[in-house]
Image (cartoon, helix red, strand yellow):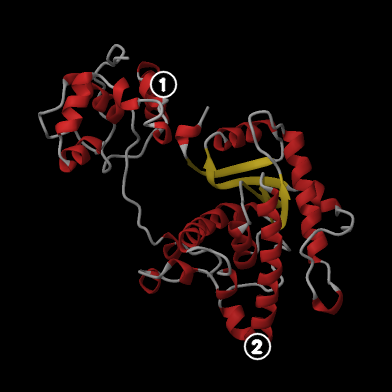
Amino acid sequence: MGPRPLLPMFTPAPAPGDPGVTPELAAVLVERQLALLKTYRWLVDVRTANFYTDRVWERLPSSWREALDASTLDELADLADLARAPRASCWPLSLLAFNAACRAASLPRTHAEMDTAARIRVGGGERGGAKGAGTRPLALLPPALRYGVRPKKAHEVSSLAPIIAQLVLPLGVKHLVVDLGAGQGHLSTLLSRKYGLRCVALDADAELVQTGRARAHTTQKMLDRAERSDGARATAAGVRSGGAGGAVGLGTCLISGTTDAAALEAAVARALADGRARARPQPHGRGNVGPTAPPEPSESEAELEYVLVGLHTCGDLAPACLRLARQSLKVRAVLLVGCCYQRCS
């Protein structure tokens, strides 16, 4: 299948040094993006994972294949750089038109500093920039919160958590962080222990949820032990043994395009009950890995407003979360980091 009619040559979006995106420019960019999707739908819908099974290479115009096959790695990198027009003159006009349409529909881009966790301070809990620069990912987490966390995940949650805290803390105590697609609840645990936010963690995989409960039990024992041996150091690190936000409630919930606000609120209520059950003192100091008969919910829980957050809201999960945010009167804010957009249906 060959390319559809080419898009008109748009005026490029502002350079990174220009003023920010205004509402008027945002509207123009959305129109350009919709036009780009409509014109190049045959290419946009391609899934990289199915490159060979769907014979994607054969679907490209022959002129594109010849040029791409003969290009060097530097030329390919130059073509993929949306900050400016390609410098090489070896590309066919139809491919250059596609490149120009992509550049015209793109938001202005600037390179953010990588040391976000060290740069953003919330409640005095973060390091200074110079001290935190170059720190290994796991070192960004308090020792007791590193258990079972891989370096990549440690880097992600330690970078996103202060941004979420900066959003939620000014909203007051009647706000609940609802972590969607939470896995074992690493992000929610950090938000609760370090920033004192009240959180629930929801995931569709019941096995991951149960593993998260076991991990939370181990983490609590490690924090209790650290507090008994060196309470001053634990306090200085900004880690709360009891968790000012309470125990993170974990629960299962499949978020899809058909999930409505009532289903979300029911899942949140179950997760809150899980948190209450595991926060209760256990005989001989033993924590509760699985839910037991929880105490009745307090009246304040009915008044909670939600802040939906998601780290790696894969594929359709991100738009499903946005639909829920529109449907539910309890949702006050949304902060999602999407991924795997090729899996969107």
Is any part of residue 249 visible from this angle? yes
Is any part of residue 244 visible from this angle? no
Q: Quadrant of residue 305?
A: top right
Residue beneath the point at 26% across and 36% down: 82
Can you identify the residue that label 1 sits on?
Answer: 34
**Is 118 placed above or below 224 here?**
above
Q: Quadrant of residue 262?
A: top right
**Which residue is situated farthest in the top direction here?**
5
Q: Secondary structure at mark 1?
A: helix
Residue 70, position as x, y percentages in the image: 14, 32
> Disc 1 residue type?
Leu
Residue 246, position as x, y percentages in the image: 73, 63
Residue 192, position as x, y percentages in the image: 65, 62
Relative depth, front residue between 188 and 21: 188
Residue beneath the point at 21% across and 24% down: 64
> Disc 2 residue type?
Ser
